[in-house]
Amino acid sequence: MSFALRVVSSALLRRATSHHYGDHPRQVADLHRPAGSGPYPVAVVLHGGYWQPPWTKLIMRPLCLDLVRRDWVAWNVEYRRLGRDGGGWPQTFDDVATAIDHLAELGDRALDLTRVTLVGHSAGGQLALWAGGRPQLPAGAPGAAPRVRGEQVLAMAAVCDLVGAGRPARQLLGGSLEEVPERYAQADPMHRLPLAVPVGLVHAAGDETISVQRSREYAAAARAAGADVTLVEPPGGHRDPIDPRSVAWRAAAGWLSRPG
């Protein structure tokens, strides 16, 4: 069975509740939660796709189901992407921040909002790293003054360097580093070091879409700046970290379940 078919078939196994955090059709997130009363830790899940169609939150549902199996709540976020969605700067970032803060409005006591992990894959990894630094953003910046804070970040096969990401990142931010340096200062993980929260990086050694070298460079720079960063390099390719059957996802889940 192909990866896409596995995603769809797994997604049909359990129904989530859908919540709109804004008026745009893309401003929606799915809540997957265990059946008990909790309280459970919460994973904010951010999909990749270089901030562009066609990928959506659907690709993350199997991972969300596995998180529920592990007694986590999963908040699977959709956001405006580049193109006709009207995403980019600052809309994509506003959406991610608003979706995270919307957790405080759900009124669900099964959600422990003191134990929130920001989980992102590929371009979603960049968004998770950005969201992890929201409390340190300057006043008035997109995403500043969060109502709900991420206590840690799990970035898988992440775009850790927006300058190195080339054209898609320039489209996301509306220009190059020389043209909009203030946007890179706020959005580029390499410009936001050190984060004040622990960061787990899971990057498959055989990733042909985003080289593991990107995560190595981020980890080295973050550690030099005094950050708490763990890098794991399991076997596999770019999508392995979001496949619940993979060694890469088991490594990621292991980091989530570590003591303390």
Image (cartoon, helix red, strand yellow):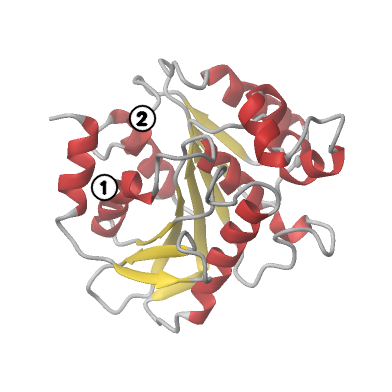
Q: Classify mark 1: helix, strand or loop.
A: helix
Q: Height in image: 62 above or below 175? A: below
Task: Pinpoint residue 135: horizontal percent, then vertical percent.
Answer: 73, 61
Could you tell whether 67 is left or right of 231 in the image? left
Q: Which residue is mark 2?
A: 239
Give the residue displayed 44% in from the left and 45% down from the top: 47
Dot 2: within a 10 Å radius of its alpha carbon, few (fewer than 14), some, or many (20 or more) residues?
many
Task: Pinpoint residue 97: horizontal percent, then vertical percent.
Answer: 61, 61
Give the residue displayed 70% in from the left and 46% down from the top: 195
Residue 29 or residue 191, whichever sits in front? 29
Answer whether residue 150 is visible to the viewer in this image: no
Please identify the quadrant where the N terminus is shown: top left
| Badge 1 amino acid | Pro
* Sequence-earlier tag: 1 or 2: 1
Dot 1: within a 10 Å radius of its alpha carbon, few (fewer than 14), some, or many (20 or more) residues?
many
Q: Height in image: 80 above or below 108? A: above
Q: Quadrant of residue 91?
A: bottom right
| Badge 2 amino acid | Arg
Q: Classify mark 2: helix, strand or loop.
A: loop
Q: Quadrant of residue 220?
A: top right
Task: Pinpoint residue 99: horizontal percent, then vertical percent.
Answer: 53, 65
Residue 145 or residue 225, whichever sits in front? 145
Q: Which residue is mark 1?
A: 62
Task: Pinpoint residue 65: horizontal percent, then vertical percent.
Answer: 25, 54
Give the residue displayed 18% in from the left and 39% down from the top: 6
> How far is the residue under mark 1 from the one under mark 2?
12 Å
Name of the residue lying farthest toward the front: 84
Residue 195 or residue 127, whichever sits in front? 127
Contact between marks 1 and 2 (CB within 8 A): the answer is: no
Give the residue displayed 52% in from the left and 71% down from the top: 23
The mark found on residue 140 in the picture is none
